[in-house]
Image (cartoon, rainbow, N blue to C red):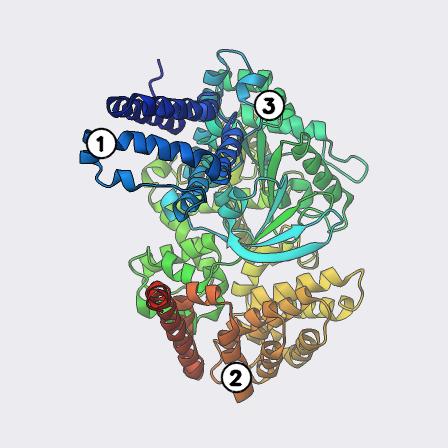
Amino acid sequence: MNTQFTSNHRLILSTLGLGVVTVMVAYFFSGMASLLVAGTLCVLLCLFRPLLMPPGYGATKIRTLSVLGIFGLASSYGFWSPFIDAAVKALAVNPKVRELAPGIENIDLGTGPSIAILAFAVVGLWIVHHYMADKSIAGGHPVPINTDFPEESFQKKLDSFCSALRQHLVTTDREANWSPDYYADLEAEVEIVDMIGTTERKRIVDLQSAIRSDRTTQAFLVLGDPGAGKSVALRKLARDMIDEVGTTGRVPIYVNLREWLPREGRRNAAWTETNKPTIQELEIFVMDNVKARGDVFTEEFVDKYFRDLWRHGRMFFIFDSFDEIPELLDVNEESGVLNALSDVLSRFISSNPQSRGVLASRVFRRPTQAFLARKILEIRPLSEEHIIQALGRFPAFTQALRISLFRDRLDLIPVARNPFLMALLGEWVNDNHALPQTQAQLYENYLKGRLAKCASKIAQYGLTDREILRGATEIAWFVFDSPAYGLEAPVRVIDEAGASQIAVAIIDVLSYARIARVTQSEPKSFAFVHRRFLEYLVTTRLLNQPEDLPVEHIPTDSRGRDALVLYAQVCDDTSANKLATLCWSEIQTHFHDPSMRLRAIHCLRFLIDAFRSRRAAVAPFVSELAEFIRLHVTQGENLVHAKICLEGTGLLSETDSLPILTAAMAGNNSWLQETAFRACRHLPRLEQALEESISLYIITMPWRQFWTSYQALTFSLSLSESLKGVHRTAVLRYRNLLVSAVAAVLAFVATPFFLASW
């Protein structure tokens, strides 16, 4: 028998107990008064009766009745206050009452509302809404779950099913070598999309809070770069929601869409412009994916209840890795498959008015407008404050290394802003007590470190670390070079294709080392725990076989793009110069053609990411590049293009970048000002006009943003000699805010005394 009481039941019992005691005391002193108290107690029990009903039944009713009761008491004051006065006078006749409560005979409520009654109304409203508000993530379903599923054993089956879902999430995090202790709240920029498709950019909020506080949006779209923390955040969201199923009556279903493979029984064939995805295919995939997380009882639950839960709007779908669906890795932004998938996922989530869901993707190759998201949450890179806090977990990351990172290694700043790469950076520093020369060293250090911990496992197969890495590289290339399988492939196919002579052993070791993972369901599927590992191993192969360079992936932002960024950072100068020249040629040829402009934008992004640390590669055309950036920052009409161009000032010399940054800081767009400000903090010198613009930016920054980011802001400003004046401005503004806050508190406290004396 379940003896656990909910908070609602405890509230009922406490109220009942207090009421009984009150009635007994009232009866002892005055029999008539006890009747009044007993009547009040009955009214309270009637009001709170819905709390004894199933979860989700009476919260709204209780809030409504309580508000009406509170307003009723306050507004009818003149009607009932004489009765209270009469009851008090009757009690005052008793000597025992006067002895226990001296002065009771002087109580007179009068006929008009008093300050006490108004305070009672305000406090009562606050208590009702604070303690009875629905604080769950998904929000309670309006219908009790036992109404839709009256079967007596259903609740136990649901609990068992949720346990399997939780275990799957825990296992996935463990395979990814992730711990909740390392979770960092992600900031997201919220964009509201209205019914006619126009957007309104809102404030910066915490990603989890943005979803938790919104009970009306049916479909969210979460955007962020690879490694930005989308998957970790969504899995944590799912785990938190599982804990609330008993209250909300909604079941979270986390699904990684990169596992939606076209063959091996998951789908009959790859999608094309003529063979587009259907909602039936998505339904089969989701059900099969969920079944694979448990045992025969999980499969039985899914077969029997999944469609009914879906039909009644009791599912909260969390779809991850939209951009990693195999067929989307190489398509362009205008692909019919991209639009069809967006539409299918939208209709799947919104199949019932009560159904809700989240879809996550990278910014480029995102869902089209066919995915009807009413709220878009774009994850922002980690701020300096978050970076400093996160790196503080690694003992070897001393203050000297932090200063060197922010002042001298500008090429590593984008790495540190990415949660996944930042963790690898911390691992590197712990092992080497210095900053890495290239991003590739982070992956090499991590992979070798993980394999070193698996020496006994590797010895069982009679292999060496080098052979494991060589075999992993061959498998990575096979997965990368197989368009049908995207970033994940069936183990049987890898083995039969001869991707490695010892593929099964290699996969077993990589899985044991938590470098890769293998699904437990049939057919078993292999994938690296993060696509960055696959891209690093592909890069090592391209260094040995540069004839296989997929340069065509740069202007299309296809699957090989990020691997080529790594390649460009470590290849020889001749190869780097060829890649840079290729990108600049694409930019010159296509930027002014609206139908081809996206190719040029992707090439500009590649230049920025790949050659920030080796600017010699862009030297042959740096003057033309500087003029191109200046024109689009100062005269361009597209803010997104202007922001990307502004980030390109990191490729320019100080002489070329100063006038561009000065113009951006002097402008009126806060988005461009923020981007320019980050670039300005690393300049060796500032012109007076630029310093004045930066100081004005600090002074006019919203006070809440300034207050919360003050420590990181002053830390970064203190690293540059040229920003000493701006640093003083920031300190003065902080002190001014502090003094103003203290003065406001003192004024608030002193005002009543001043008015009393007046």
Q: CA distance from mark 1 to mark 3?
A: 60 Å
Give the residue at x 48% y 60%: 415
Mark 1 and mark 2 in contact (Cβ < 8 Å)?
no
What amino acid type is highlighted by mark number 3?
Answer: Leu
- Secondary structure of residue under mark 2: helix
> Which quarter shows the N terminus?
top left
Tag 3: Cα neighbours inside 10 Å, few (<14), some, or many (≥20)? some
Give the residue at x 76% y 47%: 335
- Which quadrant would residue 360 be assigned to in this image? top right
Give the residue at x 52% y 73%: 700
- Secondary structure of residue under mark 3: helix
Mark 2 and mark 3 in contact (Cβ < 8 Å)?
no
Report the mark closest to the observer, 1 or 3.
Answer: 1
Identify residue for label 3: 309
Compare marks 2 and 1 and give the one earlier in the sequence.
1
Name the residue nearer the viewer: 482 or 113: 113
Residue 517 can be seen, yes or no: no
329 sits to left or right of 476: right
Residue 121 locus on image (x, y percent): 45, 42
Identify residue for label 1: 97
Identify residue for label 2: 692
Compare marks 1 and 3 and give the one earlier in the sequence.
1
